[in-house]
Image (cartoon, rainbow, N blue to C red):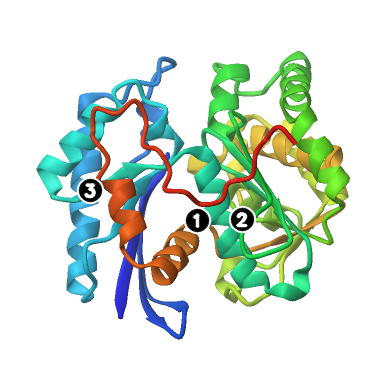
Amino acid sequence: MRMSVMDVGSNAVRLVVVDAEDGVPLPVHTAKWKVRLSEEVGPCGVIPEESVGQLATAVAAAAGTARRWGAAEPLAFATTVVRSAPNRVDVLRTIGEETGVRLCTLPGEVEAELTFLGARQWMGWRAGPLAMFDIGGGSLEVAFGRGRLPDYVASLPLGARRLTREFFDGEDLPTEQSVKALRRKVRHQLRDVAARIRWEGPRTAVATSRTFQQLARLGGAAPGRHGPFMERQLSRADLRRCRDRLAALPASERATLPGVSAPRAAQSLAGAIVGHTAMKLTDVKTVTLCPWAIREGVLLRHMEDGGEWWAEVSGREAAAPAVQPVPLRIAALQH
């Protein structure tokens, strides 16, 4: 069975086409279309009409590519930049009308659970009690669990792009005061979540995001061309050095560093601050970089439960205030 998943993020539309054999999604083709939504969205979060048109073009191209590779309509979802947009409903409706693709948004806690599912499948049961961190452009997802699905999830407004805009806007070289203010906010927002992760005492911690991948490369991990099976880790001490190195450079010069791409150079410092603070507060000394994340989680969930759960997610009324999750056994956050 050939399937595909489409992920509309803050910087790109990504497509993965897989063959689903024996419960494992084996990739046969991947593609990416740059959209840079995060650069076009203003402080109010509204996605401009021109950007919606560019997004529709990318979504249509991704859907066409999936068909050419013999896959059915992609399981298509958008992350924080669309989910939090005041004109989200109009954006989803326009994409559907112009491309025929049913693009949906998922609550942050569901994103965390699906990302954990992908990470657990990759890491296996030998990883034991597992903590997961994912830094996106708009949010930070954290999860912990002993089984296939997490026992605890949280989604916090601590995305690298969001914090860069809030604290470093207009500063090519961030001031010491701005950096300290950002660190205070991250510590405050993470306090309760970190206390829960420390109490759980995970045996293994994983990081799944592009932000962590680039920071690990800056910290000396093998480049992506060595393949997904190369073990990559990032220690808290190395991440602290990466953070300090990035803080000493103007945003315009960070792209010269190993692993730091030009589109993410400006937000790399905020990502490093969030990552280091999260590891410090949760008492995690090392994270393993996991190549499987939310896209693989969506595919795994679909393979396990069939199309009913996704049809319910993507078929919600466009006028609803938010797309609600299909029951996924999300842990209560008040523990």
The quarter of the displayed image where residue 41 is located: top left
Q: Residues within 10 Å of mark 2 (few under 14, many from 20)?
A: many
| Residue located beneath label 3 in the image | 102
- Element type where label 1 sits in the image: helix
Q: Amino acid at mark 1?
A: Ile
For the N terminus, give its image quadrant.
bottom left
The image shows residue 243 at horizontal and vertical percentages of: 76, 38
Amino acid at dot 3: Arg
Residue at 58 percent of width and 26 percent of height: 164
Calculate the distance from the C-alpha at mark 3 to the C-alpha at mark 1. 18 Å
Residue bearing mark 1: 294
Quadrant of the snapshot with the C terminus: top right
Do the CB atoms of the residues marked 3 and 1 lie less than 8 Å apart? no
Q: Position of residue 85 (x, y in %)?
A: 37, 25
Q: Is residue 104 left or right of residue 250?
A: left
User: What's the CA distance linking mark 2 and mark 3?
Assistant: 26 Å
